Image: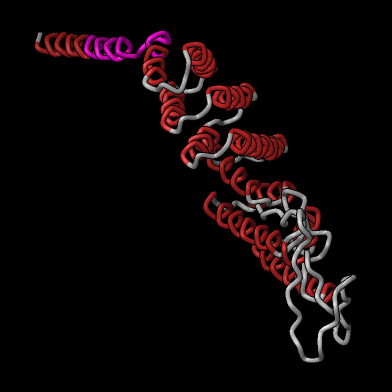
């Protein structure tokens, strides 16, 4: 009798608990705004600015709706809209940015870092071209990171902390670490049983060395070859960074000897122009600088006056 009473009480308690969970869940579900309600919130934000016309507001709301329906969180979409209004971003520029984000989402890539790029660009008053370029570069790095990860998994490797590893790869790619080097690092590190932290530390060091190589004037092809040779010369993952460092120092020293201290002509920047240090060629020892036509010779020991550019000649472009 007493046992039956205990059982009945337990069942009653379970039923009451289930009802509470159901009611709370229903309440939270009821509080979640519908897409129409979300769009009304966005309309209110857009209407708070006199920058956008009624047509432009409707256009942006349609783009925002596409983002939300594709799986972009409403709060993320709302934040972008708020920032665009705050920075008086042109409506058509904003639509292009929304469309680029949508295309990235459709490719199945993680969009958190891309949304951060957009908000960062808006905060810095970056142009549409700069923001879209940053989005496109980030999306390409995410695609490559997913490809490296997928290739390792197809070879039967079990990747612990898949999302974290994905972000590590994407960040290193953004720092111009060659794809092949990261693929090697992931496969070798996983095979050797290294933790995510250890792989992350090595990846950060590779990023540092890659940026150093790039700042030294090496081209992307030269950097890739340098990393490849260093990896081929050792089977010990802990020695690779040291090998790259030594090879990098040798490359830099050789470049200085070959060009008298300037960067090798093969090294180019993202814009395709040579670094400032390569623009002016130093005068060789014992060589007399050539005079320009029409310029009177100066007296021995005198300092020549700086030449004035011809009228109408444009000044050299600013560096990026």
Quadrant position of the N terminus in the picture: top left
Q: How many marks?
A: 0
Left or right: residue 113 versus residue 245 is left
Using the image as rendered, state which of residue 22 and residue 217 is in the foreground.
217
Dominant secondary structure (helix, strand or loop) of the stretch shown in magenta: helix
Quadrant of the rendered structure where residue 99 is? top right
Q: Residue at x 35, y 12 (%)?
A: 33
Work out whether 11 lies above or below 95: above
Work out whether 89 lies above or below 155: above
- Is residue 24 located in the magenta-colored stretch of the structure? yes
Q: Residue at x 65, y 24 (%)?
A: 107
Work out whether 19 lies above or below 159: above
Give x and y (percent) for residue 196. 54, 49
- Residue 231: in sight, yes or no? no
- Is residue 7 located in the magenta-colored stretch of the structure? no
Using the image as rendered, state which of residue 181 and residue 237 is in the foreground.
181
- Residue 2: in sight, yes or no? yes
Give x and y (percent) for residue 64. 50, 18
Quadrant of the rendered structure where residue 167 is? top right
Q: Residue furthest bottom?
A: 301
Using the image as rendered, state which of residue 47 and residue 97 is in the foreground.
47
Tell me where the magenta segment starts and ends, as one range: 18-38
Q: Residue furthest left?
A: 2
Using the image as rendered, state which of residue 151 and residue 59 is in the foreground.
59
Colour convention of the picture: secondary structure
Q: Residue at x 47, y 19 (%)?
A: 52
Give x and y (percent) for residue 129. 63, 35
Give x and y (percent) for residue 251. 78, 69
């Amino acid at each position: 009798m007493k046992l039956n009473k205990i059982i009945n009480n337990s069942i009653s308690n379970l039923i009451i608990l289930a009802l509470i969970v159901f009611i709370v869940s229903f309440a939270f579900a009821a509080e979640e705004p519908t897409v129409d309600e979300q769009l009304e919130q966005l309309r209110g934000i857009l209407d708070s600015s006199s920058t956008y016309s009624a047509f432009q507001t409707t256009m942006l709301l349609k783009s925002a709706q596409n983002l939300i329906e594709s799986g972009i969180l409403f709060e993320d979409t709302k934040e972008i809209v708020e920032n665009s209004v705050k920075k008086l971003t042109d409506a058509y520029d904003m639509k292009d940015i929304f469309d680029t984000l949508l295309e990235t989402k459709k490719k199945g890539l993680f969009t958190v870092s891309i949304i951060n790029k957009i908000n960062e660009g808006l905060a810095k008053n970056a142009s549409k071209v700069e923001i879209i370029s940053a989005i496109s570069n980030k999306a390409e790095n995410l695609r490559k990171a997913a490809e490296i990860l997928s290739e390792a998994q197809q070879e039967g490797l079990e990747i612990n902390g898949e999302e974290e590893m994905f972000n590590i790869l994407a960040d290193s790619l953004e720092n111009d670490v060659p794809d092949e080097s990261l693929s090697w690092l992931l496969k070798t590190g996983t095979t050797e049983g290294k933790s995510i932290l250890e792989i992350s530390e090595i990846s950060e060091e590779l990023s540092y060395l890659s940026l150093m190589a790039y700042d030294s004037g090496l081209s992307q092809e030269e950097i890739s070859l340098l990393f490849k040779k260093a990896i081929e010369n050792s089977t010990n993952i802990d020695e690779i960074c040291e090998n790259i460092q030594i090879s990098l120092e040798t490359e830099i020293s050789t470049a200085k000897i070959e060009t008298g201290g300037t960067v090798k002509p093969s090294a180019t920047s993202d814009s395709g122009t040579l670094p400032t240090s390569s623009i002016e060629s130093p005068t060789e020892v014992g060589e007399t600088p050539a005079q320009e036509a029409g310029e009177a010779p100066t007296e021995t020991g005198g300092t020549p006056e700086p030449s004035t550019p011809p009228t109408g000649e444009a000044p050299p472009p600013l560096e990026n």
